[in-house]
Amino acid sequence: MNYVFLAPGFEEIEAVTPIDVMRRGGMQVTTVAVTTDGSKAVTGAHGVTYTADTDIASVDLSAAEWLVLPGGMPGATNLHDCAKLTDALRAHAAKGGWLAAICASPAVVLGSLGLLAGRSATCYPGFENICDGAEMTGADVAVDGNIVTGNGPASALKWSLAILEAACGREMASTVADGMLCK
């Protein structure tokens, strides 16, 4: 299973885009509310409320294929502050599982956990200093082994297609991109 995490203050376009692209590519995606009250309703950084499929307390992440982190503030901080999620990210990274993060999340979540050390990565400009030990590319999207990072909202579609390509191959990503009229 593939999980996209929604914490209060998440960047909406960075959550909805990978959900959409991954599902177009045939991937099963479950949205997970990362809330302190167990609510599945999560309001993004721009006031749009989404209802997640499940909540963080109810989900077993041990068999995950992808763990996907939208950015946004304070969304990224709220992801980082969830012990169950950070424990799952560490365990998933340790076994070589796929991780994806965009905007502030590569830095605030993955970088602060040390998961980007020795890796090429990108993040929202101004957060690079949190990614100690990472080679910050400044690119829209960076793929290094099992980690896919993106720099911000304008790159959400490129980042999502990079996730799909890593998961399902270049042909599937190209087919989905063509169907979405991406050039």
Image: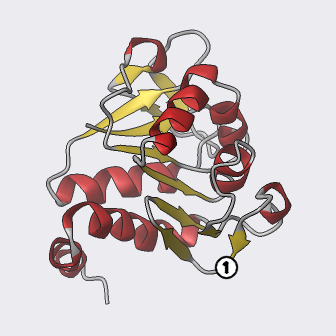
Work out which quarter of the rendered image holds the C terminus and state it.
bottom left
Secondary structure, mark 1, is loop
- Residue under circle 1? 137
Is 48 in front, or is 74? 74
Camera sees residue 171: yes
Q: Is residue 157 left or right of residue 25?
A: right
Q: In percent of the image, x 58 and y 9: which residue is there?
A: 37
Question: Closest to the observer: 79 or 113?
Answer: 113
Q: Does residue 164 appear to the left or right of 123 in the view shown?
A: left
Q: Where 96 falls versus 92 (above or below)?
A: below
Q: Residue at x 18, y 60 (%)?
A: 25
With respect to residue 182, does 24 lie above or below?
Answer: above
In percent of width and height, residue 100 lies at: 48, 54
Percent position of residue 29, x then y: 27, 41
Can I make out residue 51 in this image? no
Q: Residues within 10 Å of mark 1 (few under 14, many from 20)?
A: some
Q: Position of residue 54 (x, y in %)?
A: 36, 21
In the image: residue 62, left or right of residue 49:
left
Q: Is residue 68 left or right of residue 149?
A: left
Image location (x, y in percent) of residue 128: 79, 65
* 95 up-or-down from 145: above or below: above
Q: Quadrant of residue 113?
A: top right
On-image quarter of the N terminus: top left
Give the amino acid at mark 1.
Thr
The quadrant in which residue 84 appears is: top right
Name the residue: 16% across, 71% down: 172
Residue furthest to the top:
37
State the count of labels. Answer: 1
Coloring scheme used: secondary structure
